Amino acid sequence: MDNLQQLDFKLVESILQSNSIENLDMKEISNLFLNESSIFNFRPESIFQIDPRNGELIVYNSSRATRPSSGLDDKEQKQKAIENCPICQGKTTGIMDIIHLSEGFSFINKNMFPIFFPYETDPLNNLGTVSFGLHFLQWTSSFHNRDWHNIPAKDAIIVLSRLAALEKKLLLESFDNMPGSLSSSQDKPTYGYVSIIKNYGKAAGGSLAHGHQQIVSSNIMPKQFFNNWSFYERRGIHFTKYLLQENPEELIVKDYGKAVLVVPYFMRRPFDMFLIVKDTSKKFLHELDEEELETVAKAWQEATRVILLILKKIKKEEAYNIAVNNGPGAGLYIEFLPFTQLIGGYEKIGLWVCQESPFKAAETLRSFILELEPL
């Protein structure tokens, strides 16, 4: 594969709308979404429903069924997908944040097939079942085949810092278009909920192979955020603090000082991992100090590298999900969920059958992480 293929910076000039997300206020950001012609035919229905059995949320966007796919089923399709990558060709939405890396650049733009979209009347008078918000993409590198597992460590810190900057903008400055959130405090009110995820590989829901993160700001709280908050309400302790106290030491994969990578004792699928920020008073990425930010970036890189090594060893497709838990009651932790086992019928009724023990998984992960070379 051609590791040198990338988005040419010259193509960026025609779609660059802002060099930095900090230079835009929230009204300007919303207007950039509303005025993006490429999104017009792919907007969501802007409604949500709640499953009355468990409180899970469902949003609707029928146009997402027409999203372009990476076509990662075999080697020939993989190469064709790389050659025809719309991101490398500059066939994407306007860029709202861009920063140079040691080679190439990282940037943030709008998701062409959003699950949330700015509500075009006064959203605060229509909360009901109306869903609204903003859906961004952060492209880890302009190089097609570079992502967290193979970019230089200093570049990973830069990418994470821009992710934190977007999170901060959305949470702290959305007072005109988002309701107050449960994360609010008197000294630092927050608005709406910012969910950050990564889908890597077709089996894990990745529609494009060019490495990226998804960021959503919405008026509704994802169920996992609600679960973290409910845990805090019931027990009076942040979920991260509970894990640091109760998860067995034998399940530590690596202690990074400011954060620790662990296999949870309730591992649902082989090699699931949690990266826990030890200062449990921190709730958001943008609250991390410089050392914590560097620590999380390093651990994020190593976790993804280990996942890909293990998936290769067990002859599984390179696929995983990442979810940042930055909602109320959580502290701050990141879940790494490799695609190691299919979800079957028992899992659909809430009975997870895991094909590995947490202790054996942790032992394997520790042995692989020790073999990693510095980036």
Image (cartoon, rainbow, N blue to C red):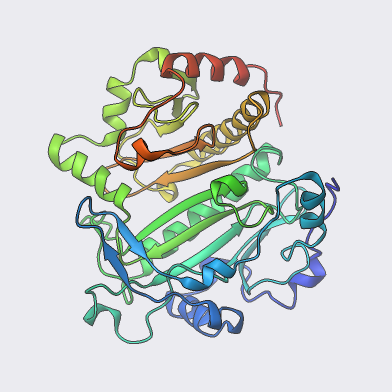
Residue found 81% across the figure and 56% down from its top: 80
Residue 110 position, x and y percent, is 56, 69
Give the residue at the far front of this rendering. Answer: 345
Residue found 36% across the figure and 70% down from its top: 174
Picture quarter with the N terminus: top right
Residue 177 position, x and y percent, is 33, 76
Instruction: Please indicate, yes or no, whether residue 111 appears anywhere in the rendered image.
Output: no
**Quarter of the rendering containing residue 88:** bottom right
**Quarter of the rendering containing residue 147:** top right
Instruction: Please indicate, yes or no, whether residue 157 appears anywhere in the rendered image.
Output: yes
Residue 50 position, x and y percent, is 25, 61
| 353 on left or right of 215 | left
Which residue is nearer to you in this view: 206 or 32? Answer: 206
Residue found 28% across the figure and 21% down from its top: 246
**Quarter of the rendering containing residue 48:** bottom left
Residue 146 position, x and y percent, is 73, 46
| 84 on left or right of 255 | right
Which residue is nearer to you in this view: 302 or 158? Answer: 302
Picture quarter with the C terminus: top right
* Vertical arrangement, residue 263 with respect to residue 279, above or below: above
